[in-house]
Image (spheres, grey):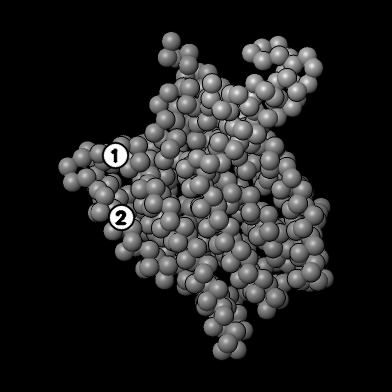
Amino acid sequence: MPRNGRIFKASCHVLPGARCGGGERSILAWFGHRTLETISLLRSQTARDAVLVAVAQLVSAVLRFSVTVFMARLLSPADWGNVAVFIAMVDVFAILGDGGVNATLVRFIAADARARASAVFAKCASLKALICVTLLGILWVLREPILENQRFPDELHWLYPVAMCAAVFVTFHGLMLSVFQAKQEYGRYALGYVAVNTLRVFAFAMLMILGISSLRGITLAFFSMPAVALLLAAPLAFHSLWRRSSAFGPTPGISTLLLFMGPVAAINAIMIGNMRISNFMLKALASSEAVANYELACQLGFVFPLLSGALFTVLLPKVSAMQSREELRNYRARLLRIYPAVLPVCLAGVLIGPWFIALVFGAKYVDSLMIVRVLVIAFGIQVLSHPLGLVFYAVSRPGYLTLVHFLQFVVIVTLNWIFIPLWGGVGAAIAMLIAASVTVAAVIAGSGWVIRVREREAL
């Protein structure tokens, strides 16, 4: 009998009346078995890769938050609120510019070791370039309505093209990271991921040394660093492609790539809309100061989306290669079993987040204290939704996930229209919490349903 089995069998006799192999099991025996299983999971290569990516993303988040603190302290709440909206624009453009290309590249390189990785990359890069050019044209035509709707002062209109150019560099930098992800070179992925915010910290340190604290200098330092990071990451990405790429393997056609990209692009667009729509609605329905408080709270609560993103990054190539229903069932069950571990982290965030804001900023952003409490809970309860959503990709039913995130978007927008005029940033946070609860319930139920449907179809 395996060692773990002996331990479990022994633990079954700790409490009277416990029986192994069926019937009643003691709470202690169940807990011992789950503990051993968790230890086994934590010692796996997947867990080590996930920890490496999570650490890189956490370090990047800490660096970006340091930059946020620098900007928020030097700028007035009104100026910081305006800059935060431009940052949100960059995030939205970068995701729309991705168009599902990054996940598609990972999917078709990781799923088939014989694939011509360089050919897949060339097609994906061409599609991304076409998407970005189209978006730039649309946004340039709509620049006046957007600037008017968001009530930007005239002296900040120059930031619009700067932010759009920064977004193009961000999305192509993400394509370079996807090469490392597809090749499962997570060391290079981690270095590339932290590069942008490391460069920002360095640039801001230089500003401090030179005594530059103007709005123009601060914003240019923030928005220019993705271009530098792209220049550093591109040579390593090309090296990974040609070093381990098959010269004669099969390559998917453009139509095959587009069929996979479509649902992924829709999901990504809706998800970034879910994350950023509150910034734009607060700017239009409340004030720049309301955006400033909400964005500061988001930066603290964002540790949970980072953890979720780390799991998604590591698991996407692995789940893409899963073929059997048993593998998918086990994958889903393991994710759900580690869900309770999120609760203590949520509680810590609820306690630490407001204290940190009050300590660093004092009364300057006092309105963000309640916002951060609500957002930490909202982000925390959906931390496993994205990794669990990979089940829908594996069974070729991403449309269900698209509908779930679209439902979340509708709930957020609808509740924001009601809550923001009443409670400002707190209302937007409550809307996010309600929408997150709906999403989590739908993903948990739907992932089990699609696996059962696949089982029936296979009979």
Q: Residue at x 75, y 56 (%)?
A: 372
Q: Residue at x 32, y 49 (%)?
A: 124
Front residue of 445/324: it is 324
Identify the image quadrant of residue 40: top right
* Residue 242 x %, y %: 24, 54
Report, in whole angstroms, how far the alpha carbon at label 2 lies from the one at label 1.
Answer: 14 Å
In the rendered view, would you say 388 is above or below 279?
above
Front residue of 88/415: it is 88
Q: Residue at x 51, y 69 (%)?
A: 198
* Residue 184 x %, y %: 39, 47
Disc 1 marks a residue whose amino acid type is Ala
For label 2, the SS is helix
Q: Residue at x 64, y 54 (%)?
A: 302
Quarter of the figure that contains the C terminus: top left
Q: Is residue 312 visible?
A: no
Please tell me the numbered disc located at residue 231.
none
Asked whether the beta carbons under mark 2 and mark 1 sit within 8 Å of each other, the answer is no
For disc 2, the marked residue is: 240
Disc 2 marks a residue whose amino acid type is Ser
For disc 1, the marked residue is: 113
In the rendered view, would you say 203 is above or below 176?
below
Dot 2 crowding, Cα within 10 Å, few <14, some 14–19, many 20+: many
Identify the image quadrant of residue 204: bottom right
